[in-house]
Amino acid sequence: MATILDAENRITAAARDLGFSAVGFARAEFLADEARYAALWIARRRHATMKYMENPARYDPQSFLPGARSVVVVLKNYFPPVRLNLRYKISAYAYGRDYHLSMREDLERLGEAIVRMRPEARFRIFCDSAPVADKAWAARAGIGWLGKHTNLIRKGAGSYFFIGGLMTDVELKPSAPATDHCGTCTRCIDACPTHALTPYEIDAGRCISYLTIESKNPIADEFAPLMEGWAFGCDVCQDVCPWNRFSLPHNDPRYLPLDVWFDPYVVEAAPGSQRRFRRRVAESPLSRISLKKWLNNIENAVRTFPKN
């Protein structure tokens, strides 16, 4: 049977073979500090309407996988080789296939690699769709630190990464923690159009990504003039981050722009049926919102798109 170190090395090699940009390991223990901070954040209603953030199970590995001993966390680069040139702005994460689908496929393969190594092993995967604090685990696993914009930053690589992972009952040696390298920089805070950021904290109800995706309501009059052309998500805080000067274009064809972004029916926001819209945007992150929401987003984004 492989030793702990052998297991760690073999899982790392398997993750690299699957195209993950980084891999780290953490002990599957209750995230006490993160849970306390989240409770205060939620008490101030900084999570807006995202009720799932209130689930305390997000910080307890045993609620997710009873008997879990380790957390394996991976990153997948999605920094785009080219930017879409539309009448409005789309977050780079949304260009290609929905990462929840693609990452899940790759994470299942990583779990299968663990089972081949340890046939008795159990695992359960997560990727932004389970009651798991993904970013907190990524920081615990030492593959980056949570920046002042609350996104994970990896030294020398930036922040354009999808985060995913798995919990397992295999014991693995925890990775050394990453150190914070934001320093005195406040570019993300200064650049946020809706003033959603304070150091290391976000007011989700003011965030453009929330307003254009998570919120089911039309963009409020308070924020509508401040959207700067964003129709789905927002990359401002990442674009201005000095660490993203090290970002390298990804080479995964699944995250290249889908045909949906060249479909006149979608990009010109032609009125139509919800069913037709769903069919056109299937497997795109755009499937997360309704046609009505998309039409409202585009109308406002075109109106506020910077003229210079």
Image: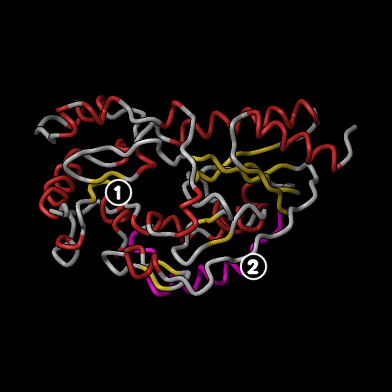
Magenta-span inclusion, residue 20: no
The answer to which of 284 and 36 lies nearer the viewer is 284
Q: Which residues are magenta?
A: 27-49
The answer to which of 88 and 112 lies nearer the viewer is 88
Residue bearing the label numbered 1 = 213
Circles 2 and 1: CB atoms closer than 8 Å:
no
Q: Quadrant of residue 6?
A: top right
Q: Relative to 237, is 243 on the left or the right?
A: right
Quadrant into which the C terminus falls: bottom left
Residue at 66% x, 60% y is 178
- In the rendered view, tell whether residue 23 sits above or below residue 138: above
Disc on res. 256: none
Q: Residues within 10 Å of mark 2 (few under 14, many from 20)?
A: few
Residue at 62% x, 70% y is 33
Residue bearing the label numbered 2 = 32
Quadrant into which the N terminus falls: top right
Q: Relative to 54, is 286 on the left or the right?
A: left
